[in-house]
Image (cartoon, rainbow, N blue to C red):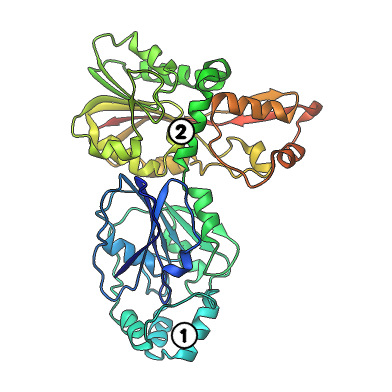
Amino acid sequence: MKLCYTHKESNSRLLLVYAGWSTDESAFAALRCPGYDIAVASDYSELLPPEITGYSEIVLLAWSLGVHAAELTAARLPLTLTIAVCGTPTPVSDLTGIPEAIWHATAEGLSEASLTKFRRRMGAASMNRGDRSIESLRAELLAFPTDAVPFRWDRAIIASDDRIFPPANQLRAWQGRAEITEIAGPHTPDFQQIVDRFVINKQLVGSRFAKGLPTYDGAADVQHRIADHLFSLWQKHGLQTSSVLEIGVGSGYFTSLYSRKLRNAAITLWDIVPASDRVIEADAEAALPTVSEHFGAIVSASTMQWFNSPAAFLLQVARVLEPGGVAVLSTFGPETFGELSRAGVVGLPYLSESSLRRIVPADMEILELHSGLIVKSFAEPIEVFRHLQATGVNGRRSERPLSEIIASYPRAAGGRCELTYQPVYLLLRKR
């Protein structure tokens, strides 16, 4: 297997791309992901784990045949977000992959002419295939392992006009296994749009929260209401514990609620932007897998939506909790900031209640899982953006100018401008 870095700036995070068959790193030369180095794997003639070290977090984006190649070679890497694009875990299957007769006909009858036709069907006729021979490409297909293997996928992207992996087969393959997003277009999608939509720019998140810290408590009435309700749920299910790890401390409002009741507990505080000397600077997705100690409670109010992979995070929470320990968490659901989405701002990839229920680890008992709606009202759209700036909660860049977003912002009855939050509350107990 070939591994080539297309963008390297000594970042602590890596975007690892697995290319499709008959393509190489040149297809991703223009791809950018702020705060991440980018490496591209291709040529699956020999399936060996890539030699990658020095990264605290790796986001995986696998395309086409690269989906199964990643399953076979990347499982031991420190992966958070895993995105499968126009491929399946069973690449040769009449029901959940490329139909078997088509796969074998493609391999056995491969020629320069048939490869050119195949790449047109991919929507990748202009892509460089590198210097690989027809014989090498044919041998790769004929020898490629196709049996399913265990692997965790967060998201599956399915293109409506995919002429390689039939969309209906992809839907069957991913149903109940990953979050499915259907997009328009061919087998070769716009990879930059996918990265911009699903990979969290943690540098931007940190800078906006840092900027909003001085004004946060004065503007974060919604977050305070959410913290109050989360604390009441924790009390309902028993508050006693000897050790707490809080992730995403922010200004410390939630900490102040529970610490008064747990005076003898050892409390560890983490945040990507520490607001005091008591708080350890930590990106929880990267830091939690390195923790060897155990806690009686892991708590996090209004933070989990900033993680690349809530599923990977919950697996680590289950690992680090003591038996009988509790996870006290809140995040946001897909109705959050719906008004901004209608104005053209790409929102975070929020998970629904049912999606969160699907990713709860098997060794965790669900004590609470429910959501609510909180709607704030403003006189003018600009007030919405002042509110967001004061709290630092919108860590997403938009390609549209602010003036266009303001002009497109929807108005409710009476001409007011609303902003919807959908808090989701999740309490889990380690079995």
Image location of residue 219, percent across then percent down:
58, 19
Q: Secondary structure at mark 2?
A: helix
Q: Which of the two residues, 406 or 323, is positioned nearer the viewer here?
A: 406
Residue 41 in view here: yes
- Of all residues, the one furthest to the front in this rendering is 9
- Of all residues, the one furthest to the left in this rendering is 292
At label 2, which amino acid type do we have? Gly
At label 1, which amino acid type do we have? Leu
Quarter holding residue 139: bottom left
Residue receiving disc 1: 115
The residue under the point 44% across, 78% down is 129
The residue under the point 34% across, 45% down is 12
Q: CA distance from mark 2 to mark 1?
A: 46 Å
The residue under the point 27% across, 15% down is 240
Residue receiving disc 2: 206
| Residue 198 appears left or right of 60 | right
> Label for residue 307?
none
Residue 96 in view here: no
Quarter holding residue 412: top right
Q: Residues within 10 Å of mark 1 (few under 14, many from 20)?
A: some
Which is more N-terminal, label 1 or label 2? 1
Image location of residue 286, percent across then percent down:
32, 40
Q: Which of the two residues, 106 or 384, is positioned nearer the viewer here?
A: 384
Q: Quadrant of the N terminus?
A: bottom left
Image location of residue 420, percent across then percent down:
62, 31
Q: Is residue 199 above or below residue 229?
A: below
Q: Which of the two residues, 221 or 152, is positioned nearer the viewer here?
A: 221
